[in-house]
Image: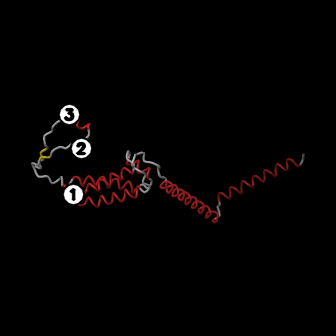
Amino acid sequence: AVAFPFARHHQQCNAATHTKKKLNTTQHIPSGHSTSLKHKKKRERETKQTTKRMFATAMRLMVKKTTGITGLPVIPEGRKILIALYEKTLEDIKTIPEDVFYRTAVETQTKKMLQVCRDHEDIETIELKFSPFQIEEMIVRAEDELELIPMMREWKPWDVPPGTQIPIVYEDDEDSPIFKELEHLIPAEPPVVVDNH
């Protein structure tokens, strides 16, 4: 019965001493301990950066299984291929005169899409920017443009003499039964007269 209050007093003294030491430790951090904290924070930052790089790599390796379009397979390296096609397009379009609208339109659109491919490495983000087209569809469109450029260079539709009559041609399959059945419904239109003045 006599020892109980003494023991309780001893515990209170120990608790007060522990609190004082804790406060002193908080207020006066040894230089070595401060350095270790800096190293710890540095390691945490490096770990976060490594995690981000691993996540980015995993996203690049994620490949969709199908495009959902018959005859159009998935192209795993679609981004690299599309960048190469756009760069070639910007080079080939230089063979068209600078003041031609076709060249201006192609250059503007191609530069915009090329920047999207350069800014983003994962296919999913690129396709969101190109929505509703998939990257495989964009590759087909870029290849078609590259085939069209030399044709436009040869045809020179911007260099039509004044007064030239240009007949309007419907791009329907004239041999199809449907076209022959509806041909009489297509109104006869007069030729378009180009006047450059």
Report the residue that reaches farthest toward the bottom.
Answer: 32
Q: Nearer the viewer, mark 2 or mark 1?
A: 2
The image's mark for residue 153 is: 1
Q: How far across and down, in percent of the image, does residue 108 sit?
A: 29, 53
Residue 136 image offset from top left, x and y in percent = 39, 51
For the residues carrying marks 1 and 3, which lies nearer the camera in this image? 3
Image vertical order of residue 103 relative to residue 169, above or below: below
| Residue where numbered disc 3 is placed | 185
Who is closer to the viewer here, 164 or 95? 164
Could you tell me which secondary element the residue under label 3 belongs to? helix
Q: Which residue in the structure is indicated by mark 2?
A: 171
- Whichever of callouts 1 and 3 sits on the residue coming sooner in the sequence is 1
Q: Amino acid at mark 2?
A: Glu
Which of the two residues, 42 or 68, is positioned nearer the viewer here? 68
Residue displayed at 13% across by 43% down: 191
Asked if the residues shown at circle 2 and circle 1 are in contact, with their CB atoms under 8 angstroms apart, the answer is: no
